[in-house]
Image (spheres, helix red, strand yellow):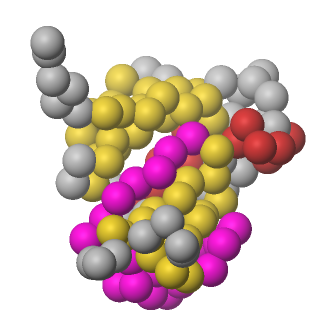
Amino acid sequence: MSDFTKVRFVLAVPDLARSTDYYTSVLGLGIEFTAPGWTFLARGSFRVMLGECTDAIPPGELGDHSWYGYVTVSDAAALYAEYRAAGAEFTQPLADKPWGMREFGVRTIDGHRIMFGQELQA
């Protein structure tokens, strides 16, 4: 059986420059590669490919279908503070959940939603 070695989310965005700026300045991802109409970004093992699709349905209009990822992190409180200082819009505040995660949600500038969580020790 083959192991998965990397996960990369692929997102349609209406304005590639605007979205790239958000992912780098607010979410702290670095640019790995660019190509016409695309930006490849990463922070640790979290990877995103942004593709410019000016005519796509805006993610904010997709309701629950705008969720696209759950990212497990080493320190959710520190990341929450970093994103708050950077001006991120939160869909859920930082909280400990009964399923053993300390987590929070973010809405991107395009309306995509991401959850970030840290496994709590038993």
**Where is 31 relative to 122, above or below?**
above
Quarter of the picture containing the C terminus is: bottom left
Position of residue 45 in the picture relative to residue 76 (left or right):
left
Residue ranking furthest to the top: 1
Quarter of the picture containing the N terminus is: top left
Q: Quarter-wise, where is residue 107 in the image? A: bottom right
Q: Position of residue 28 (x, y in %)?
A: 36, 64
- Which residue is found at the position 25% from the left and 71% from the top? 74
Q: Which range is magenta?
A: 68-93
Residue nearest the observer in this picture, 42 or 67: 67
Magenta stretch containing residue 76, yes or no? yes
- Which residue is found at the position 71% from the left and 50% from the top? 111
Position of residue 74 in the picture relative to residue 3 (left or right):
right
- Which residue is found at the position 40% from the left and 54% from the top? 71
Tell me, yes or no, if residue 59 can be seen here.
no
Q: Quarter-wise, where is residue 81 in the image? A: bottom left
Position of residue 114 in the picture relative to residue 31 (left or right):
right
Tell me, yes or no, if residue 115 can be seen here.
yes
Residue nearest the observer in this picture, 97 or 40: 97
Total numbered circles: 0
- Which residue is found at the position 15% from the left and 23% from the top? 3
**Where is 120 relative to 48, above or below?**
below
Q: Position of residue 48 (x, y in %)?
A: 40, 39
Residue ranking furthest to the front: 122
